[in-house]
Amino acid sequence: MHVTAVIPAAGTGVRMGGPVAKPFLLLGGIPLLARTLLRLARSQVIDAYVLVVPPGSEETCAKAVVAAYGLPAASRIVPGGAVRQASVWAGLQALPPGTDLVLVHDAARPCVPVGVVRATVEAAARDGAAVAAVPATETVKEARPDGRILRTLPRESLWIAQTPQAFARRIILEAHAAATADGFLGTDDAALVERLGRPVTLVPGSPENIKVTHPADLEVAARLLEAQGEG
């Protein structure tokens, strides 16, 4: 089975508060995107990569990330869209021939355990669609537009979705095409598959699989990498 990883990395990092696009921020002296790609490569279940980067930064990515760290050559480096969903769709258009399974993983999740990557790919190969997720551990409230609590949701049945998320090629292409045609904007790729009525398997994720969103997250990620032996 040929697995292609689509890595949305087109965010400008507005919440990081700096002039450098988030994929190129240094984490332990190495660009964030490179850290994530190195981790994915260690899983040994990915055959090709499509990197979706801020428009105009394709050459920078090729030199400062892929070539500089001896990473597996990306199948393609393509410019992203205005929102994450558009960026993933751009990446899907660049899938190499022969791709059977598509793994989508946020460039901003450099600490994902290798076992989670492998388990997600295995589940998707078996079931067609799989998502790494962790159980909700805190009480979740649903609110009304005025900010008042509508109800408390039963956390026993709630999961917090992460990436990687993996799908059979035909399923994720169908889901994104339908969302584009309908003008539907989801918060993750699994949501697009779910709205087609297709089942998605939950795979145990990890609390270590944090998403770097704010400046303080870089420090947390650096400590996690050091604890994982990759500081």
Image (cartoon, rainbow, N blue to C red):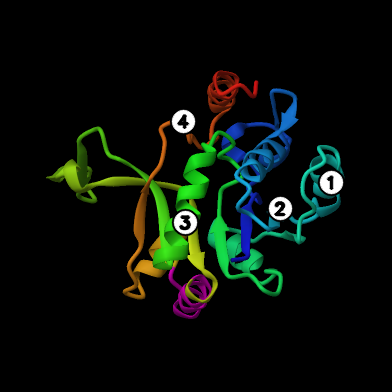
Q: Position of residue 90 (x, y in %)?
A: 65, 67
The image position of residue 156, as x and y in percent, is: 17, 43
- Element carrying mark 2: strand
Q: Badge 4 is on which residue? A: 208
The mark nearer the N terminus, 1 or 3, is 1
Residue behind mark 3: 122
For residue 21, say whether it is visible. Answer: no
Magenta region: 172-184
**Tag 1: amino acid:** Thr
Q: Which of marks 1 and 3 is in front?
A: 3
Q: Residue 50's spot in the image, x, y percent?
A: 69, 59
Alpha-carbon distance for marks 1 and 3?
Answer: 33 Å
In magenta stretch: residue 207:
no
Q: Mark 1 points at which residue?
A: 60
N-terminal of the pair, mark 1 or mark 2, is 2
Q: Earlier in the sequence, mark 3 or mark 4?
A: 3
User: Could you tell me the amino acid type at mark 2?
Assistant: Val
Residue at (69, 23) in percent of width and height: 28
Residue 83 as seen in the image, left or right of residue 140 = right
- Report the side of 186 relative to 1 (left or right): left
What kind of element bears circle 3?
A: helix
Q: Earlier in the sequence, mark 2 or mark 3?
A: 2
Callout 1–callout 3 Cβ contact below 8 Å: no
Sequence-wise, which precedes: disc 4 or disc 2? Answer: 2
Local SS, label 4: loop
**In the rendered image, which residue does mark 2 sit on?**
53
Q: Mark 3 Cα within 10 Å, few/some/many (few <14, many 20+)?
A: some
Q: How crowded is mark 2: few (under 14 residues within 10 Å), some or many (20 or more)?
A: many
